[in-house]
Image (spheres, rainbow, N blue to C red):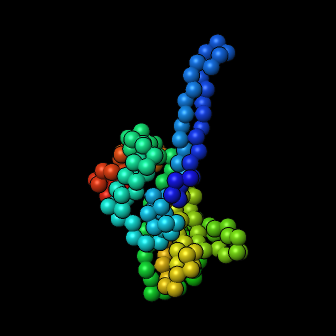
Amino acid sequence: YFGYYSLKVLETHNYKNGIIANKIYNLIIDGSLHKNHFKGKNYKRFTFNNLQTEINILCTGLQLKPAKCEIQNIEIGVNIYTAFEVISYIHDSVLLHSVKPFEKYNADENGMIIGRVAIHTQHSVKCYDKGLQNGLDYPLIRFEVRVTKMQYLEKYGIKTLADLENFDKVNALL
């Protein structure tokens, strides 16, 4: 572990004539820059400067080069404070994203269903009650794009952590 990240080393062997020719080690980092910045929570505003701080902490702490750190999936979202009850809004009003229907989340360990998701081929769009998820005393709705196939981000030129250091590329996601 490093902060709120989980680390795993994956060893890969390349063979030549049945003998190991070389070994390659890949570091898999599982976690959220946003959650790490706020010590496990991700309902507060996460700015471009916060993003830069977290990339720096991660790369300095683990001696990584941002241009060598490939992103395999990423979530981009916005939290909105509302004057209305979020769950009923989501269930009554969030129906389609493009041509994909929003479906109910599976119930969590407490039996709660806090949102809906529209699943596409390379990404999904989620809408859920962030206030309920985090036990907040105010309504907070989150809209989020979860990218699972990086081809979806090719049009933004985002492949590595170094790309997330570029303000224009990150701003284009908005």
Tag count: 0
Which residue corresponds to the image point at 64% horizontal and 12% vertical from the top-left? Answer: 17
> Which residue is the extreme one toward the left?
168
From what the image shows, is residue 32 above or below residue 115?
A: above
23 left or right of 58?
Answer: right
Asked if residue 140 shows in the view, the reply is: yes
Which residue corresponds to the image point at 45% horizontal and 87% vertical from the top-left? Answer: 83
Instruction: Name the one closer to the observer, 34 or 112.
Output: 34
From what the image shows, is residue 47 above or below residue 162?
A: below
> Looking at the picture, how far across and down is residue 6, in whole percent?
57, 52
Instruction: Name the one closer to the observer, 69 or 150.
Output: 69
78 left or right of 6?
Answer: left
Q: Quadrant of the C terminus?
A: bottom left
Asked if residue 159 shows in the view, the reply is: no
> Looking at the picture, how far across and down is residue 124, in whole percent?
54, 58
Q: Quadrant of residue 95?
A: bottom right
Which residue corresponds to the image point at 63% horizontal and 69% vertical from the top-left? Answer: 104
> Looking at the picture, how far across and down is residue 100, in whole percent?
55, 61
> Looking at the picture, how far across and down is residue 115, in whole percent?
58, 72
